[in-house]
Image (cartoon, rainbow, N blue to C red):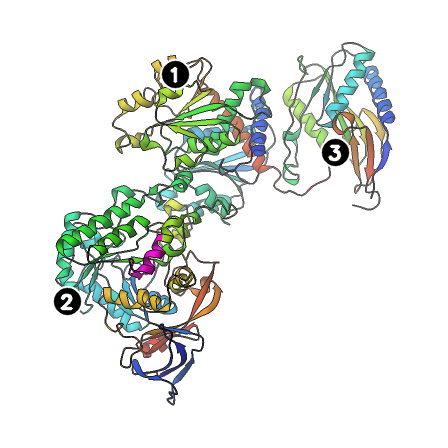
Amino acid sequence: MPARTVLQQADIQRALTRISHEILESNRGGSDLVLLGIPTRGVVLAERIAANLERFEPGSGVVGSLDVTMYRDDLARHPTRTPSPTRLPAGGIDGKTVVLVDDVLYSGRTIRAALDAIGDLGRPRAVRLAVLVDRGHRELPIRADFVGKNLPTAVAERIYVRLGETDGEDAVAIEGEGSGS
Amino acid sequence: MTTVLIRGAQLPDGSATELLIEGGVIAERGSGLSRSGATVVDADGLVALPGLVDLHTHLREPGFEQSETVLTGTRAAAAGGFTAVHAMANTSPVADTAGVVEQVASLGAQHGYATVRPIGAVTVGLAGERLAEIGAMARSRAAVRVFSDDGKCVHDALLMRRALEYVATFDGVIAQHAQEPRLTEGAQMNEGALSSELGLAGWPAVAEEAIVARDVLLADAVGARLHVCHLSTAGSVEVVRWAKARGIRVTAEVTPHHLLLTEQLVADAAAPYLPRYDARFKVNPPLRRDEDVLALRAALADGTIDIVATDHAPHPIETKECAWQEASFGMVGLESALSVVQAAMVDTGLIGWADVARVLSRVPAEIGRLDGYDAPFEVGSPAHLTLVDPAGRRTFGTDALHGKGVNSPYLGRELPGRVVATLHAGVPTVLDGELRDASEVSRG
Amino acid sequence: MRHLLTTEGLPREQALAILDVAEDMAEVATRAVPKLPTLRGRTVANVFFEDSTRTRLSFETAAKRLSADVITFSAKGSSVSKGESLKDTTQTIAAMGIDAVVLRHSASGAAEVLAASDWIDAAVVNAGDGTHQHPTQGLLDAYTLRKALHGDASRGRDLDGVRVAIVGDILHSRVARSNVWLLATLGAQIHLVGPRTLLPVGVETWPVTVGTDLDEVIAQRPDAIMMLRVQQERMHAAYFPHEREYANAWGLGDERLARLPADTIVMHPGPMNRGLEISARAADSPRSVILDQVANGVSIRMAVLYLVLSGSDTREVAV
């Protein structure tokens, strides 16, 4: 089954711009804000949002990465993942508003792992969640604060997020519609 | 007593004949033979060999009956085409008295699968300190002629000299397990790049060669007969060749496994999917290098090495299902010996079936002073013979093993040749490739 | 990675992956609560047929930092002295429900035999087998070398062109064997030095250069010098005349330390015989990374336990 593109480059850019504005608005400005991307593509998205914030409000684009591999509860059921580095900004996360950034929100288990990881790294004032795509099928009581696009899917379908920095182009595609493959 | 008529067998010299066996001896030979009531064996396409004689068998009884007994060991022998075995002395109690050797010999006679010739210990308890009752064993009903501390080397030069001199009185021979003990302390496998890589203590070739060299010089000095057990290195071959050229009365044996297998089986770089450290390949002396195997084959072909002997060494499973260093040394070999000799020597064109008869029957019987093997297939000779199908091929499995041990290095390997029938003193111990029941065999 | 048994034949990519994961694990040690939930619910059995408090503690620490449960079997005072075998012991422990066996055994190849057998299903990590291998020691040494040379920029780098001298009892050393194959795979140039009696037969087939003169090695200014422990039992087995002669010829004493370039790092797998293969001054000098080796050992063992206990099912699963 061929993949169907649901978001083009311009759609992605617009969604990220909107999310950036929403973050600043809900945080009442850019102070004490830390964006943490979840590898691999969450880090790219976090860096793009940080660049937006920096444009809108200089000094507010503080960004890092948070690897959650070691906090997953499904180690044996997946091929071995080589963890990516966790990089916290120099100021740490204590007392900050941390915005977790990921590409796709699905079962919620990755975010659960991320919350556990954050808990081991410090004590933020608040933790928010920004995702490019929310495809539904949550298995945990987790909800995103900032969503690029809600995309209702079937479980059998797969979502592919491609970003210029990692994949050479910006696109979100959906594959396996109705075929279950 | 069974009467057996063998039709169409090819003798080792290449001629074909019919053989009528009656009363335990070859009664008639020629063509067009018949006898009513005889068990007829159609041997078309089979090679008839004289009954095989093993000069080096561990029957383990008395003392280690969980490993093997005289009955199970001689059943294994019969299945492999053997009609006589020489039982090594390292039992418990050690075969160092007339009582023990007579017991072992009579157990063999009682079961009837093969003639059991006990080997007497050279030293009391194999301890290498004082001579065992060599004279008493020689004069006993077991009439021991071969003496060996096998498993241990008679390393004390003075004791070895005395032993060589003393057994000469009884026309005996010392069968030396050539292993310098200090050079092989803790040794696990052939010393070389592979042992170093695997972290297994090396067993240097010189530990064998030094003893062989010393012993041939001692034998020369005292004018006695020496037999060297399980030669395993090219260097030992050179020493024996030199000694024979000098006229020293030395005979030497090689095991089937040293003619076919190498140390690469402990860890084969070319086959990294095979598990390493498989203790089935742990044996004393250790498997050596390709060049040693080739030298041993050449030496057997040219007569430098006189005989093949199995060093059949059964062990319980648990002594091989463990780390290499903790495993016992030894392999079972009676059931596979002829096939391995065929693979290594006959199918490679190095020797023919007449040579097989020589190295696996006539000469080992001569060394052991065992009567009845000097004129096989002659009318009136004892009917010890085996029929082999050289064209048969089989994947060697535990179903081929009839002793208690399953520690064969050949399991899963394809081997040529198959023993179709074995007759011990005219009694079929194997017929149609099947071992016969103990009750049938002991009845004769 | 199903098991970790030997560094021989360990692919370069896999070796680097272990070192890189260890970088992440090292970071955990710096936290207020140095613990990850990764192996919660998993049980690691330390099965030690041979005493080694250091290695056992290091593995235990690693497992606990990953939230695994740890059970320890140690041969002393156990049924092994009554003749219980590797098979029976490991099967008994496996029957209690374990996910990995960390095996220390005095017989070379014991871990490989266990892994190749059908006795147990658990992952097997070799924690030292006879005089054969101690792969996590090789890995922690490679990690230590890389860290000393590249610092925070270590991730993803190999040891291309790094010159390492390994000194002493090569013959009986599983540390030397583990290092030789691993460091060679990672591109290092290895030079082995020791008395002829303690160099293995056939060592010329290894990916190393070999010599007997330690001073010559020092003059060549290696990047690292690794001193091996001299086992007590070797001293009475005619490998060398006596301790003083060994120390004079192959020990890293104060005088040799002074000739060593300032940026050559000094390594030792421990436990040290101070005054024999290494002087107290050399062991405690700023170039010594001996305590780093210990700390890095925990990170490496965390990485190894993580890698053998994750991804046991290799099916591709949609995320």
Closest to the observer, B184 or C302: B184
Q: Which residues are magenta?
A: B295-312
Mark in the foreground, 2 or 3: 2
Q: Are marks 3 and 1 in contact (CB under 8 Å)?
A: no
Q: Secondary structure at mark 2?
A: helix
Query: Mark 3 belongs to which subunit?
Result: A
Rounded to the nearest angstrom, the CA distance separating label 3 from label 1 is 57 Å
Q: Is residue C32 visible?
A: yes
Q: Is residue B50 above or below residue B218?
A: below
Tell me which residue sits at (55%, 32%) in the image. C15
Would you name the residue on which mark 2 appears? B139
Q: Chain of mark 1?
A: C
Disc 2 to disc 3, C-alpha distance: 91 Å
Neighbor class of circle 1 (other Cα within 10 Å; few <14, some 14-19, many 20+) is many
Q: Which mark is residue A140?
A: 3
- What's the amino acid at mark 3? Leu
Where is the C terminus of chain C found, in terms of image quarters? top right
User: Element under label 3?
Assistant: loop
Residue B423 point in image, percent of width and height: 35, 75
Of the residues shown, which amino acid type is indicated by label 1? Ala
CA gap between label 2 and label 1 equals: 72 Å
Q: Which amino acid type corresponds to the residue marked 2 in the rendered image? A: Arg
- At x 44%, y 58%, the residue is B410
Residue A177 drawn above or below residue B40: above
Q: Position of residue B163 (x, y in %)?
A: 15, 55
Residue position marked by numbered label 1 in the rendering: C282
Regarding residue C59, the answer to whether it shows in the image is no
Q: Residues within 10 Å of mark 2 (few under 14, many from 20)?
A: few
Q: Which quadrant of the view contains residue B251?
A: bottom left
Image coords of residue A149 (percent x, y): 85, 29
